[in-house]
Image (cartoon, rainbow, N blue to C red):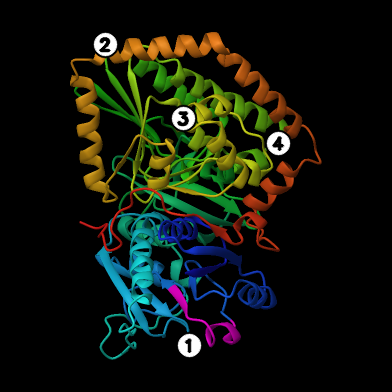
Amino acid sequence: MRVLLLCSAFNGLSQRIHRELALLDCEVSVQLATGEAAMERAVADFLPRLIICPYLVHRIPASIWRKTPCLVVHPGIEGDRGPSSLDWAIDSNCTEWGVTLLQANGEMDAGDIWGSVSFPLRAAGKAGHYRREVTAAAALLVKRAIASMQDPAFRPRPLLPEKAPGRLLPPMTQADRAIDWRRDATDTVIAKLRAADSAPGVCEEIAGKTVFLYGVRRETALSGDAGAFIASSNGALCRATADGAVWLLQARRKGGIKLPAARVLVPLLDKALPELEQIAEPVRDIRVERRGDVAYLYFEFPGGAMDSLQCLRLLRHYRELQASDAKVLVLMGGEDFWSNGLHLHVIEAAANPAQESWENICAIDDLVEAIVNTPRQITVAALRANAGAGGAMMALACDHVVVREGVVLSPHYRTMGLYGSEYWTYLLPRRVGQKVAASLTEKCLPLLAAEALQTGYADEVFDEDWHIFGRELEQFCEEIARSRRFERHLKAKRDLRAADEKRKPLQQYRDEELEKMRATFFDAESEYHRARRHFVYKIPAKETPAHLRRQRRKVRFWQRPVFSQPFS
């Protein structure tokens, strides 16, 4: 079946749907919503039987939806309509929400219903829900829709507004999102910030400047005058509410880019913050949990990006675990992302982006080198969430790679104009072979968990349900630690590393990669600088990248049933 993905951006949800369709043996092409003429031309050229819109903030031309069925993923329950669906649900503290697959017509979110899925609304930000529950529900609904296309008796059902649980809501404005720091309780502040994460943020005036606030964590011990900034920790700022305090994780000035909150706000408030307390522990973006002989290392970095300082801090924690008596070390990443490598926002904001890029990649390489050279423990990369670029390569430094079903991986660099480092020229071919490694890094297509298993990138794929995955992962790691052949496995690991080192030293891989990276970083005219700037400032593409148009992949390996339910 020919399926066209029509989307405003090829984001995580669009990538997941793209690969799910490929696994169903659909012929898939992508068209970014770069203009009405471009969309019409893509439909005329590809002649799809079905158009799916996983993430679309533009209107579909009537000339398209009148001729070809267009299914729109709406992150709301049946009857819910409007562009701020998930925002209102979180702001209103709803306990359950859902996703509806609608057929486009002349009225926004009012078309016939192809299916809907509900899920519990946990205590998390909008972006977190979108990447986990919304994406899983959308994938399920799209797979059901493909199956329905094969059923001559199937008919979508009309939306009956008077019977549907949802309703039409207006776009949420900054007036709706506004925080009254002197009157609003901590719960209210958290709900507002979660509803605005990771876009558009909560707008307010600070020291006469317009800023946008993103990301929040509750503070349980500190307090102060409502509205006052009272402490900083690992780039976050603590601000007092009417009955407590919260940590603000990121911020940006109007017209600027998103950065750690302290980096944006402290310069504005410097004279007003003479006694700002520096605290290391409250915002624990890096933490360790020890369960018996297994140590779990979490690194919860906003956006999954790691700047030089974060890499150094993570390396210190990892070195401590290497020196411990733990038998298995598990790299857990964060809840929203496992890792995405270089911190492009910090690099863009640096006085010397080329030098910051260099220091950042060297710091990541130091971390990857330490993971590769871990002779006393078995290491596990537990990819609970998506990973990309250097982060996707870093996972391969571990002895075992375990992926949660539905996770999307992007093990390539070329779309950012980079050759790449993180020892990928050693780690990726070692895992998947030279031919597959070349395909992954040159075609620049995403890789779904099932595909990662088939190619050899991953060793295990566990359940998509977050809690079931956690139990399966814990059992897997405990079995490694308790194995009677544990010491034999360690010896085999050391022998293999020694043989690889003799064949080609690890340092040589690093030197060769960094030679190319350095040339790119310090070339002011390189594509990397333009691509990075477009990425951090969210400048939309003018046309659909050639590698996303008309891709086809035959299914030749195991996949889960179309109607498997990802929710507990």
Q: Which residues are magenta?
A: 61-72
The circle drawn on residue 405 is none
Residue at image position (67%, 75%) is 41
Q: Which is nearer the N-term, disc 2 or disc 1?
A: 1
Q: How many C-alpha atoms fall within 10 Å of the one at disc 3: few (<14), some, or many (≥20)? A: some
Three-letter amino acid code of the residue under disc 2: Glu
Name the image quarter holding residue 147. bottom left
Name the image quarter holding residue 300. top left
SS at badge 2: helix
Residue at image position (57%, 62%) is 9
Q: Which residue is mark 4?
A: 353
Three-letter amino acid code of the residue under disc 1: Glu
Q: What is the x, y in percent for residue 446?
A: 51, 49
SS at badge 3: helix
How many angstroms separate mark 3 from mark 2 (CA)?
23 Å
SS at badge 1: loop
Q: How many C-alpha atoms fall within 10 Å of the one at disc 1: few (<14), some, or many (≥20)? A: few
Between circles 4 and 1, the one closer to the viewer is 1
Q: Which is nearer the N-term, disc 1 or disc 3?
A: 1
Magenta residue check for 67: yes
**Which one is in front, 279 or 88?**
88
Q: Which is nearer the N-term, disc 4 or disc 1?
A: 1
Q: Which residue is mark 2?
A: 487
**Which one is in front, 281 or 266?**
281
Magenta residue check for 107: no
**Image-based side of 418 in relation to 447, left or right:** right
Three-letter amino acid code of the residue under disc 3: Arg
The circle drawn on residue 431 is 3
Q: Which is nearer the N-term, disc 3 or disc 4?
A: 4
